Amino acid sequence: MIYRFIEIKAFTYRIGLVFIFYMISRWLFAFFNSDFIKIDSWYEFFLLSTYGLKFDLAAIIYMQGVFILMSFIPGRPIYKSWYKTTLKFFYFTGAFVGLGLNFIDFAYYRFNLMRMNSNVFEVIENEQNKAKLFYHFFDEYLYLFFLFFFFSILWFYLYRLVKIDIKTRKFSNYYWYKSTAVFLLIIFLCVGGVRGDYKKSTRPITLIHAMENVDNPQHADFILNTPFTIIRTWRKTSFKLTNKYSKQEIEQVIKPEKNYSNKNNDSIKPNVIIFILESMGREYWGSLNRERKIPNYKGYTPFLDSLSKHSLIFTNFFSNSRKSIHGMSAILAGIPSFETAYTSSAYSNQPIESIVSVVNSLGYDSSFFHGAPNGSMGFLGFSKTLGFNNYYGKDEYNNDDDFDGYWGIWDEPFLNYTKNIIDKKKEPFFATVFTLTSHEPYIIPQKYEDKFEGGFLPMHKTVRYTDFSIKKFFDRAKTQPWFDNTIFLFTADHGNQTYYDYYKKIINRFANPLMIYWPKGTLKGVSDQLSHHMDIYPTLVDLIGYDKSFRSWGQSLVSENQDEPYVINYFGGGSYFIMNEDYIAISNGEKIIGFYDSKDKDLENNLINNSNNKMKKLAYKFNLFLQNYMNRIVKGEMKLENSDE
């Protein structure tokens, strides 16, 4: 009996340590991201911490499952040194992997603004210099590595304070009966811990359940832990068929099939160049913030600001993406990425309608340019899915003298290379240029270190450099015969480092730029219309004069016939938002859990208890959109001719 007590005492102590270090990790996560995760009081802080315990329990069962079962399996030779060593190995493997994942999110969360999930691996899986990138991140976040090793050593020390000192054991019939009963009880408790409870309708708890007791999506990120979010999204898909709403309802409200009359009557079609500017969110663009009245505001895009005076700019534009590859699908094909990213799903290889397929059908030469090694970020594979005729990357550039040492070719020389390739193209041509330098580790060529004044954040100098690189591209391109008949569209995949409080607000973290410049056209002015990535594809389809029907959840921003604008995106933690000009609705994918005034970008005042018809219509629109989005992807109806919904 005394042996059993010693074992249970040691097990409880060791599992208790796992809970303690998971909780400490949660608190450190909040500390390192305190400018994003706002908690109003100590009471709320500890209340949210208690909500996190069931997610910690589930993660601990996943990560410590072998240790838990080995600690209670009947007949275990706990007195044998080899068994103790094996037990310790599985304990600390689960412990340190879990701790390490939580610590990585202290830094990574600032770039992604959601807990890491299994999609994180698509960021690096195609990179050719993983070792160098790891070394850079090690050097950049050395303090986190020291902190991790400190807690690891502390954990190992505390583990050793309680030992199981059993020399031998007798296995009586009573022992076998009791041990088997305890073992089965442990399995039963583990099943309940993974499921969240024992209700008949319960399935294993997921990210969505983190929103059950909170209104703020960032509070859900505090409640969750990173091992849980990775495990619960590993090889999982959130795509599912539903038939709650009819085809007629969807067509009336969402209008996923678009058709624009042919405005462009010229026999010569315009060329199109889309610049997707890496991480260059709306915050950095002076021309997009003139009317914001942000205290002490400073912009970092002097050339783009000068070009904006001759362009049509959109000051209320938002992204539908968080990662670069997700931006590619949202911008070029109008496909946003939610809990399961479309580009990393099992459905991503199906034929899809996009601006690329449209221009190809009109006889355009289509090319994708990105200065990283071919395959980086998954761009090469998805460019083939979209149907680009040509792909130009670091491999085609073929000059490592201009390699930045981390991601690819510096923006200035690669944009010069891009211009030289375009000069040889037969018109009309379509090109997507994805820049690279304005990205962590925030470095620019040595020869320009003294040319560009830094800002409040490391990102600011790289934004200046990319803006300068675009200016050099335009200085060279404007003398070419193709220039005047080319539509230039500028946007970004997502934002990056944030300095101003206005852009730290939850919704404004998705604030993005959009500018359209057409030297021979009449597209000039400032629009504050609510818009998002999904509107780019139909806008370009409209501008080039394509007059057939096509699939799109967005709308042309230059059409005379405008539907009610809206923005949609995914927070993480299982929650989505949809916003129109009046309200913001928050959904966990199954039901609406919050309504906010559209001006309440930090989601401070939940109006759900006073919902009105306008709010209910917005919720209805979200549900229609989500059903059509899921069904079309699952049923392979991403090209209009394949649709029968």
Image (cartoon, rainbow, N blue to C red):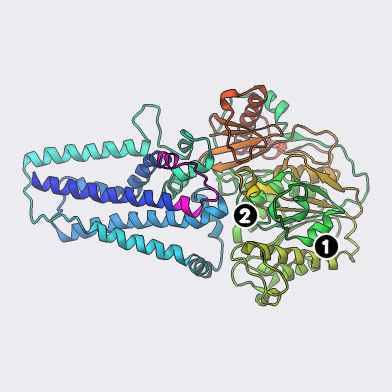
Q: Amino acid at mark 1?
A: Lys
Tell me: residue 350, above or below residue 418: above
Q: Can residue 548 be seen here?
A: yes
Asked whether residue 527 is drawn in magenta, I would say: no
Query: Is residue 40 in the magenta section?
Result: yes
- Which residue has dot 2 on it? 498
Q: Amino acid at mark 2?
A: Thr
Give the residue drawn at x 75%, y 60%. 301
Q: Residues within 10 Å of mark 2 (few under 14, many from 20)?
A: many
Quadrant for the C terminus, please: top right
Q: Label 1: how many residues lie within 10 Å, few (<14), some (14-19) or many (20+)?
A: some
The location of residue 209, given as percent across then percent down, is: 45, 36
**Nearest to N terminus: mark 2 or mark 1:** 1
Query: Magenta segment, which residues?
Result: 29-47
Q: Is residue 224 above or below residue 96?
A: above
Quarter assignment of residue 48:
top left
Q: Who's the residue at 80% across and 34% down the image?
A: 562
Counting from the top left corner in percent of width and height, residue 551 is at: 72, 38
What is the quadrant of residue 488 in the picture? bottom right
The circle on residue 215 is: none
What residue is shown at x 44% (from left), y 56% (from top)?
A: 103
Secondary structure found at label 2: loop
